[in-house]
Image (cartoon, helix red, strand yellow):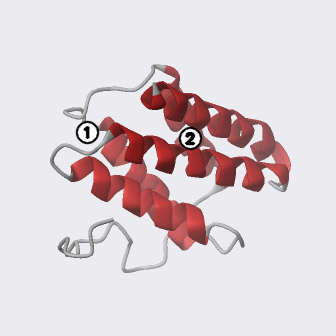
Amino acid sequence: MDSTAATPTNSAQPTVPLAVSDQQASALLDDTLALLGQGLTDKASNHGAAEIERWAAVLAASDRPGLAKITQELGQLGELLSSPGPAAHEIAELLASLSAETIKVAESAPGDYAAPLGHLGALLRKAANSLSR
């Protein structure tokens, strides 16, 4: 990351604590799996950026341990995707790291979240691999 890059002034984080129900979390997970299941879209599409912002807000509001690195990497991914001409290898590295962290979280996820989070980790790995080629 370039140390001379401007610090973003707007934040996707809510000013009021965000309460996310299990139903909302499941819907977000389903939306993300559907988006990634369609393959990588071009940069002009705002769907990916919107999903990144949604996840960052939800994870920032969560009290679950082990999510700080994912939240940080999502922020980096959002910044990278909004920059002019991001390098595919940089995006691939972030996606691979997000995949590994997501799979770690899936291993200790409560209830019905383990399988979808594991699937999300696999789709992130697949996306990273497709960019690495």
The amino acid type found where label 2 is placed reads: Ala
Residue at x 29% of width, y 58% of height:
79
- Would you say residue 19 is visible in this rendering? no
Residue at x 45% of width, y 64% of height:
57
Give the labeled residue for mark 2.
27
Q: Quadrant of residue 21?
A: bottom right
Q: Quadrant of residue 12?
A: bottom left
Q: Quadrant of residue 46?
A: top left
Q: Is residue 114 above or below residue 126?
A: below
Q: Is residue 44 above or below residue 16?
A: above
Give the labeled residue for mark 1.
46
Residue at x 69% of width, y 33% of height:
119
| Left or right placement of residue 46 versus residue 94 in this view | left
- First-in-chain label (2 vs 1): 2
- The circle drawn on residue 123 is none
Few, some or many residues within 10 Å of mark 2 (<14, 14–19, 20+): few
Residue 56: horizontal and vertical position, in percent? 46, 61
Few, some or many residues within 10 Å of mark 1 (<14, 14–19, 20+): few
- Would you say residue 28 is visible in this rendering? yes
| Left or right placement of residue 4 versus residue 40 in this view | left
Q: Nearer the viewer, mark 2 or mark 1?
A: 1
Residue at x 48% of width, y 67% of height:
72
- The quarter in which the N terminus is drawn is bottom left
Dot 1 falls on a residue whose secondary structure is: loop
Dot 2 falls on a residue whose secondary structure is: helix
Residue 14: horizontal and vertical position, in percent? 38, 73
Q: CA distance from mark 2 to mark 1?
A: 19 Å
The amino acid type found where label 1 is placed reads: Asn
Closer to the camera in the image, 72 or 13: 72
Residue 31: horizontal and vertical position, in percent? 50, 35
| Left or right placement of residue 109 versus residue 45 in this view | right
- The quarter in which the C terminus is drawn is top left
